[in-house]
Structure formats: C-alpha cells, structure tokens
Amino acid sequence: AQSVTQLGSHVSVSEGALVLLRCNYSSSVPPYLFWYVQYPNQGLQLLLKYTTGATLVKGINGFEAEFKKSETSFHLTKPSAHMSDAAEYFCAVSGSGGSYIPTFGRGTSLIVHP
Amino acid sequence: DTGVSQDPRHKITKRGQNVTFRCDPISEHNRLYWYRQTLGQGPEFLTYFQNEAQLEKSRLLSDRFSAERPKGSFSTLEIQRTEQGDSAMYLCASSLAGTQNEQFFGPGTRLTVL
C-alpha cells in the first residue's frame, strides 16, 4: 500500500519569502514521487518528479524538492514566493505493488501575501 | 499539442438523471485515467485504460459508473441514476506507457447534482 501525508492544509507566506510545503509518503518499494499544482477551476500541472538518480529535483517556476529516503519525505521549496504561486499543491506517490497509479495527498493551499 | 480536453466543463443535473462526460487525451498517449476530486481533497483514482482495454478499476467505481474507450482514443465516463454524493470534479489524464507515469491532466468536468 502507498499513502501520502501533506502537513498543513494551508500555508501562508509573504511575497519574497521562502516557500516550504511538506510531504511524507509511505511505500513498500522505491517510490516515484510527484508534485502537482492546481489553479482554480483547472486541472493539475506537473511541477516536478523524482524517479531515480539525483535526490534533489528541480522543476518549473523555480520550485525544487528533495527526496529523503531516511525521512520518507519529499518536501517542496521555492526560495522566493511570487503572487502567481498562490494555488493548490498536491504531492503524489506511485510505484507500490507494481501499480503505477498515483496516490495523491489532500493538498496544501499556498496563500501569498503582498 | 492541444493537451487533454474534457467536455462539458460544467454539468448540473437532477438526482436520478444519467450524465456522460467525454475526455480527449493527447493524441499519442496510450494510457487514459479518470479521477474524482471533491472539495479539499486530492484526486481519487477511478479507472484507467491502456489503449481500449480497461485495466484497473477502483472500488470507488460503483456499478452506476461505467467508462469506455472504444477505439483507444477518446473516453467517456457515464454515471447512471446520479446521487448528490456524485457531485465532484471529474478529472481525466493521459500518459505514455513507460514514462514513470507522468500524467497530463485535463481541466475537469464539474458535476453538480441537485
């Protein structure tokens, strides 16, 4: 079985501040890990993914995430928040049990204050 | 690249009516997925196709739900005898097999059952 826990349903930051969105996963096999972003009334867009290799993954829009196996974490960061980053962010895990169907977390709403 | 498209974007229906949604994947993608997303939750997997074959169905997919992909291109999701609990966003995604399950999502169909 696989699962994802996103700590904090809402994260609020000031424009220019560091963004940190937390994701912990559970998987019985080496996982594939993903972060998606969803803007209002739109589908999900892939920000970045980890499959194998380098544990620090860079994505679009200045986001990056680090796979830490010992901590079963895949936290998403961005050094400086922009107003346009305000959206819902979903962490997902796949690979467990031979199925590549991802399991999504409940999401974290990022609020950016001017 | 026109991306994944879904039709309609919004559907309001009365309880007990049948509804059908359509998804057109990215043309070269052979995998197609359906998800349901309710407010404050991440997407929940419903079913997926590889070409025209329906390979996996979630236990969330009750017998009132049926999905088809007759020619391995577009797909339809039908809900019979709708219930208020069916109100949700229905998301479609597509991918190529063998790409660590990088999925591209459509904008979704928002269903409201009155």
Image (spheres, coloured by chain):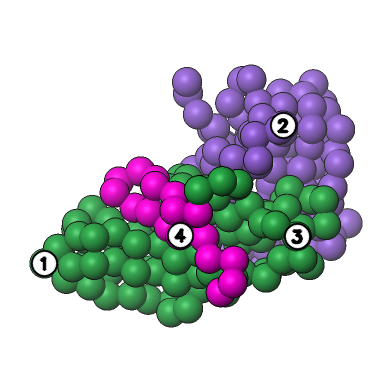
Chain colours: A green, B purple
Q: Is residue A89 above or below residue A12?
A: above
Residue B113 highlighted magenta (yes or no): no
Name the residue tied to disc 2: B97
Mark 4–mark 2 Cα distance, whole angstroms, equals 25 Å
In the foreground, A13 or B38:
A13
Magenta stretch in the rendered image? A55-71
Q: Which mark is residue A66?
A: 4
Q: Secondary structure at mark 3?
A: loop
Identified at 23% across, 53% down, the residue is A84
Query: As drawn, is A89 to the left or to the right of B15?
Result: left
Image location (x, y in percent) of residue A5: 57, 74
- Residue A65 image-quadrant placement: bottom left
Q: Is residue A2 above or below residue A48?
A: below
Q: Secondary structure at mark 4?
A: strand
Task: Specify the amino acid type for callout 2.
Answer: Ala
In the foreground, B38 or A83:
A83
Labels 3 and 2 positioned on one and the same chain: no
Name the residue tied to disc 1: A114
Q: Which mark is residue B6?
A: none
Name the residue tied to disc 3: A29
The residue mark sitting in front, 3 or 1, is: 3
